[in-house]
Image (tube, helix red, strand yellow):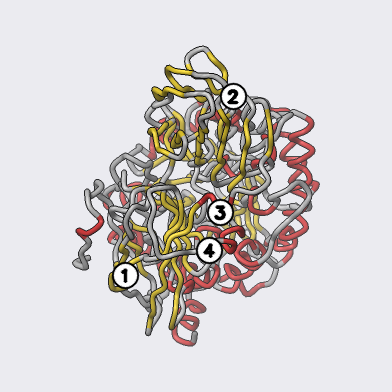
């Protein structure tokens, strides 16, 4: 079930004129009143927009925040991503792209308050809802529960978040107004003891200001996911009736500020579905209803950006539904940071409801955008170059049992006695191709419930199963069931295959080991090219006809691509390009002929095209 169903001079000077009047007074007093939020004792309407720091290249943070201000927002809302900050138990990373404190300080400098949502679970179409994969390593723990092992892990993480940014709360002169406890917990369970434990961990981590919970606007979700001492806000979309949604909140709790914690003014995409959009007038209508009544609101998303690398998650309704790399979300600011028709519709509504004396900043200048002429990937490297020191096991091991979070796993066994029938790797996750003696036999795919393949194996044959993690489930009851790879046995008919060699392939630093030659292959591997630029700028790398895989440019993992669509291009930020020589590496499941790529000014959302040679520059 889907979540919606379930529930510097010139620009700087202009921005300064539009700063909230309380900004210059030092540390303000922000609190939850009986019907509204209060800033220094006066009613204050939060006009917020969600934008997540890992989905926007760090050099673009300030540009995007200035566009949030130009949209008319006074607050930026962000999740905190546990899996990025604690990739291994006890090892923390708040550097570079993950520098949360720098992100919040930039918001402060640009005149934006902050709503912080540290989880520990965050959903957001992100792998495992932002939880680190090592939580699943056998013997695993029950996430989002009062399991002592999970609470011990979440406490360590939240303490570190507090050490990094609690001093940036508004009461201490920083931008943080609100901190969320958990995330839409009422859609998952109703253990108030667990919810209270997370609240206490956030307090113990050093956050002293107002805390809140957010849930769908149903009575059961509100009851399950709220605590009596915390502000409760509701989430709904631009296709919903805000009057009805807030009537539900009023029914549940008569007192407290009124806020839509996530106003879904767009939607996300799964591979194999149509690209989702919503009418700008619908988004504007709901926002106008709220602002005309002094109701606070957070646009989800104001700027969606990109789930770079292997961070896109998945849903599970009738089947497994992996999310696309693009998190454009049909947001007011598109994936490349450009204002859309929805931006201007929402800005007009906000401008109509501005407090006396406040005016909106002008839009900052657009960042450069470029096209890249077609070039050929003429070099090839086999994936098998990366097969080192296998793990040996009677039965296949999951990715998590191998201590691996993302990428691929290669499973190999040698057949001891003849076997014929349906090959079935039980609970394979999520996509695989099968090879016998190096020859491809077919594919297996969780999302389309293709879980068996007819084979005829002779004694001495080598069976290889290459499995790709397409993204762990990030929402719903199957969150607990999130192992990746081959997670149980492998059968041919009733016969179990044993004695496996297992090769982890996280596809990270090991790419530097690759040796390329000028010869293509129909085996899984990498294609490489170098191209030269006189000027840099944002572009969309056109991957139509390239099948399925992932792309790195100058060492940056742009994410997964799949000609199944709807996404046919990958956003390539200009800040990751350089004048002169640039390098692109494409992992592909089959590379019998060299790919040809180009850079376009605009993304393509469409059904796949049959041949790579049909490239065009008319976009």
State the residue position of label 1.
375
What residue is at 32 percent from the left and 48 percent from the top? 563
Distance Cα–Cα, label 2 vs label 3: 27 Å
State the image coordinates of residue 611 (x, y, percent, origin top left): 22, 52
For the residue carrying disc 2, how many other residues have a C-alpha within 10 Å: few (<14), some (14-19), or many (20+)? some
Horizontally, is 234 left or right of 265 in the view?
Answer: right
Horizontally, is 37 left or right of 158 in the view?
Answer: left
Q: Which of marks 4 and 3 is nearer the N terminus?
A: 3
For the residue labelled by badge 4, is the local secondary structure a helix, a strand or a loop? loop
What residue is at 61 percent from the left and 42 percent from the top? 503
Distance Cα–Cα, label 4 vs label 3: 8 Å
Q: Nearer the viewer, mark 3 or mark 1?
A: 3
- For residue 344, say whether it is visible: no
For the residue carrying disc 3, how many other residues have a C-alpha within 10 Å: few (<14), some (14-19), or many (20+)? few
* Mark drawn on residue 515: 4
State the image coordinates of residue 169 (x, y, percent, origin top left): 69, 60
* Mark drawn on residue 385: 3
* Mark drawn on residue 488: 2
């Amino acid at each position: 079930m889907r979540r919606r169903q379930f529930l510097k001079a010139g620009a700087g000077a202009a921005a300064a004129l539009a700063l909230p009047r309380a900004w210059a007074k030092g540390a303000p007093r922000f609190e939850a009143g009986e019907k509204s939020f209060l800033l220094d004792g006066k009613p204050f309407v939060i006009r917020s927009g969600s934008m997540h720091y890992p989905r926007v290249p760090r050099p673009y943070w300030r540009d995007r925040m200035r566009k949030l201000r130009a949209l008319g927002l006074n607050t930026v809302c962000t999740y905190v991503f546990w899996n990025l900050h604690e990739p291994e138990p006890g090892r923390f990373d708040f550097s570079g792209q993950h520098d949360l404190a720098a992100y919040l300080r930039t918001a402060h400098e640009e005149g934006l308050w902050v709503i912080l949502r540290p989880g520990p679970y965050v959903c957001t179409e992100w792998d495992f809802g932002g939880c680190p994969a090592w939580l699943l390593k056998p013997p695993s723990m029950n996430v989002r529960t009062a399991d002592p092992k999970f609470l011990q892990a979440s406490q360590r993480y939240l303490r570190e978040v507090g050490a990094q940014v609690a001093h940036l709360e508004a009461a201490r002169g920083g931008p943080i107004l609100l901190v969320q406890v958990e995330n839409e917990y009422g859609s998952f369970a109703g253990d108030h003891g667990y919810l209270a434990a997370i609240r206490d961990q956030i307090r113990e981590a050093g956050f002293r200001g107002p805390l809140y919970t957010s849930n769908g606007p149903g009575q059961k979700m509100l009851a399950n996911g709220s605590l009596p001492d915390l502000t409760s806000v509701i989430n709904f979309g631009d296709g919903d009736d805000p009057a009805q949604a807030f009537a539900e909140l009023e029914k549940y709790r008569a007192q407290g500020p009124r806020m839509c914690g996530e106003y879904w003014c767009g939607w996300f995409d799964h591979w194999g579905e149509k690209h989702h959009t919503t009418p700008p007038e619908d988004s504007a209508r709901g926002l106008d209803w709220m602002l005309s009544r002094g109701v606070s609101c957070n646009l989800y998303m104001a700027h969606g950006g990109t789930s770079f690398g292997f961070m896109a998650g998945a849903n599970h309704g009738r089947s497994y539904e992996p999310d696309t790399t693009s998190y454009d979300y049909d947001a007011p600011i598109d994936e490349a940071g450009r204002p859309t028709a929805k931006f201007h519709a929402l800005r007009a509504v906000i401008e109509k409801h501005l407090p006396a004396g406040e005016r909106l900043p002008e839009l900052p200048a657009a960042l450069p955008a470029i096209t890249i002429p077609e070039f050929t990937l003429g070099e090839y490297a086999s994936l098998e170059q990366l097969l080192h020191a296998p793990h040996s096991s009677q039965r296949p091991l999951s990715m998590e049992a191998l201590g691996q979070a993302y990428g691929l796993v290669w499973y190999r066994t040698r057949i001891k006695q003849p076997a014929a029938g349906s090959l079935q790797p039980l609970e394979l996750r999520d996509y695989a191709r099968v090879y016998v003696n190096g020859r491809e036999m077919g594919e297996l795919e969780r999302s389309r419930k293709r879980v068996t393949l007819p084979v005829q194996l002779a004694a001495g044959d080598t069976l290889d199963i290459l499995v790709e993690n397409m993204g762990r489930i990030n929402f719903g009851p199957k969150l607990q069931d999130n192992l990746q790879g081959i997670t149980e046995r492998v059968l041919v008919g009733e016969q179990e295959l044993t004695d496996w060699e297992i090769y982890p392939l996280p596809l990270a630093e090991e790419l530097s080991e690759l040796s390329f030659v000028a010869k293509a292959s129909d085996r899984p591997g990498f294609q490489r090219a170098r191209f030269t630029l006189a000027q840099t700028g944002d572009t969309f790398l056109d991957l139509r006809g390239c099948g399925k895989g992932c792309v790195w440019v100058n060492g940056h993992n742009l994410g997964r691509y799949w000609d199944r669509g709807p996404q046919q291009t990958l956003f390539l930020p200009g800040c990751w390009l350089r004048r002169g020589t640039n390098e692109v590496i494409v992992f592909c499941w089959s590379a019998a002929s060299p790919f040809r790529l180009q850079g376009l000014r605009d993304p393509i959302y469409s059904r796949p095209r049959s041949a790579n040679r049909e490239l065009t520059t008319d976009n």
